[in-house]
Amino acid sequence: MSRRANARIEEKSELSHGETLRVLGRAFRYARPFRNRFAVKYLLLLASLLPLLITPWPVKIIVDHVIEELPILPSAYPSALQPLAEALVGLPPNEVLYWMVVLQLALLLLVGAVGTGGGERDRAESKLSGGHDQASRTENEANEGWSMASGLLGLFDFRFTIKLTQALNHHYRSRLFERIQGLPMTVFDDERIGDAVFRVMYDTPSITNAVYRIILAPLASIAFVLAVIWVIAILFGDHPIFWQTSLAMFAVSLLVSLPFPSTLRRRSTASRRAGSATTSSLEEGLTNILAVQSLGAEDREQDRFDDDSWSSFVRHRSVIVVGMVIFVFAFIPGMAMGAYAFFHAADLVILDQISRGDFLLLFTYYLYLIFACVDLGALWIRLQEAAIGLHRVFFLMDLPTETDAVGTPPLPHPPEEVRIDSVEYHYPDGTPALRDVSLTLRVGEIVALAGPAGAGKTTLASLIPRFLEPKSGRVLYDGRDAAGFTRDSVRAQVAFVFQETLLFDATVEQNIRLGRPDATEAEIRRAARRAGAEGFIRGLPQGYHTPLGRGGGKLSVGQKQRLAIARALVREGPILIMDEPTSALDPETERALIATMEEAREDRAVLVIAHRLSTIRHADRIAFVDKGRIVEEGSHAELMARPDGAYRRFVDLQTRGAA
Ligand code: ADP
């Protein structure tokens, strides 16, 4: 079938804040089947944050009691650490040092955290060192594992998270693929296929990103912030400056990022679209490689791919630039506030209100606090990219599919007669294809559709198995509207031999069996024999078990056609539709085609879209189609008897052309 670009159901390139929220809310619902695992992940996250409160202590103890040699006062320690402090009382400094090194090593092994500063927040990540186009980045996301801890806890948490990420992605991808399979064929013009591949593979991972950020980050960060503020207050008394500057940093990171979400959404959309275009041009270039090579169009194709691919990188860079701008704007006030708090803490040491070890402890906690607050403030902006990925996936999911309404009955019995009754059809882009067409097929009859290219023959044939649905009029199976029965049960009545043969990378036998999965070996061989395919199949290296390569690449056009006919014959339905190849058929394939029609007629209705007079002549009736209408109908002899008939002119043209 000739396929033209369909009018697209246009996708919004701009999302409002409200729509972004709705998209994220919907992503949240996809995580519901995994709620238990998310609860475990949440506990793991909290468990990995707790050690962060302990890890700065050995350093404090070393500074105060080993370097400064201050006496150990257990009462000055928080109650949880008092037993530790008591155990250290009276020990010489070098022994204190020894035990602290042991403790630090133990912590390292268990939670992988060492020393002061922000370093212990190192996330153990599974990221491949990926490229910076959308596809390789998101491939990382689909397999992302992370943990706030490392060491044994981190290892466990990390493995758990990878599994959860993959399970969630798999669930979401499968749902999407299921929906795609139910889309009507008119959705997929060539451009859409690359686009759909991109959406399935590279837009879906946004789900994990979004869900982790929405579910885990805020809860865990808020819990952590409160815990740290509380610990600081208990240990060092009331110093509002620490939580105030942290809160201010939350505000700064929120305010600084506030003007950017819509820019980021636009850029992310552009980046993903560029990725889709790259996938499409790759898909198209490879599918049509022969045409490209034979026309010497490699350079042009190369340029096209280069443009698309390069722009997918450039677009992504522009997303990164937005992130950097935000970082710079937030960094300057952040430094100022950090310095202010630093001097305040240093003052406390100078005034002898806290020890040097306390200073390290306090400042480490303060850094935790500030990072967590900045993270929280940046949450909204961080969600934008994921929201765009999700929006693109939901868009594809929401295209109307061909699912039967609940309770639709199957067709009760194989039909004796199919009647197309006053049907109109136009393609989604508005191309009118059929106007007021009526035609009846009966078991025992061969009907040929003839007419110029683009007349509407394929469209007409596609209505019978409900590949297309009439815009008005009906397709009647024994007088009952086919639209009232399930698609599967209607399609089971029809064997369709397409003009372009669609073979898969599987063995000969598997390709035929596709027509009816439960066919016996004998039935498969009989179908192959009747389709005139047996001879060449026997000549193949492994006979019926020979793998065919992609698209049946190892066979000639005629051989592929005969396999497609065998596949149709192995089906049991009473309707056989054949779209005769327009390319010259080798005599053997043509004989097979005609023999198939003749034999199938005994217990089937045969509709053949015929281009060659030799095929048309075998039909009991010929419907001549022109500009979307059936203009003449009758036997070859009847139609030839009309002096000015369209069919007669068509035949004259053909025979003259052949002469
Ligand atoms: P025929 O089989 O007689 O060559 P078709 O049924 O393939 O004709 O096409 C009938 C008309 O519908 C033509 O004008 C063709 O361009 C148009 N058409 C076919 N497929 C599509 C499609 N997927 N989208 C839009 N228009 C289409």
Image (tube, grey):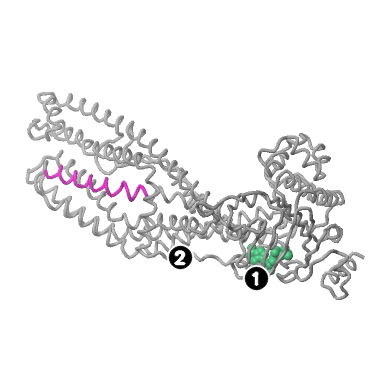
The magenta stretch is 211-233
Image quadrant occupied by the N terminus: bottom right
Residue in front for this viewpoint, 61 or 36: 36
In which quadrant of the rendered view does residue 627 lie?
Answer: bottom right
Q: Identify the residue at horizontal 76%, vertical 59% (top origin).
A: 609
Front position in the image: 619 or 43: 619
SS state under label 2: loop
Q: Residues within 10 Å of mark 2 (few under 14, many from 20)?
A: some
- Marks 2 and 1 sit apart, C-alpha to C-alpha, by 29 Å
Magenta region, main secondary structure: helix
**Residue 8 to residue 158: above or below:** below
Above/below status of 156 relative to 130 = above
- What residue is pinned by disc 2? 13
Q: In the image, is residue 420 above or below residue 503?
A: below
| Membership of 215 in magenta stretch | yes
What residue occupies the far bottom of the structure in this picture?
A: 644
Image coordinates of residue 81 in percent, x first then y, are 15, 32
Mark 1, residues whose alpha carbon is within 10 Å: few (<14), some, or many (≥20)? some
Q: Residue 432 carries which label?
A: 1
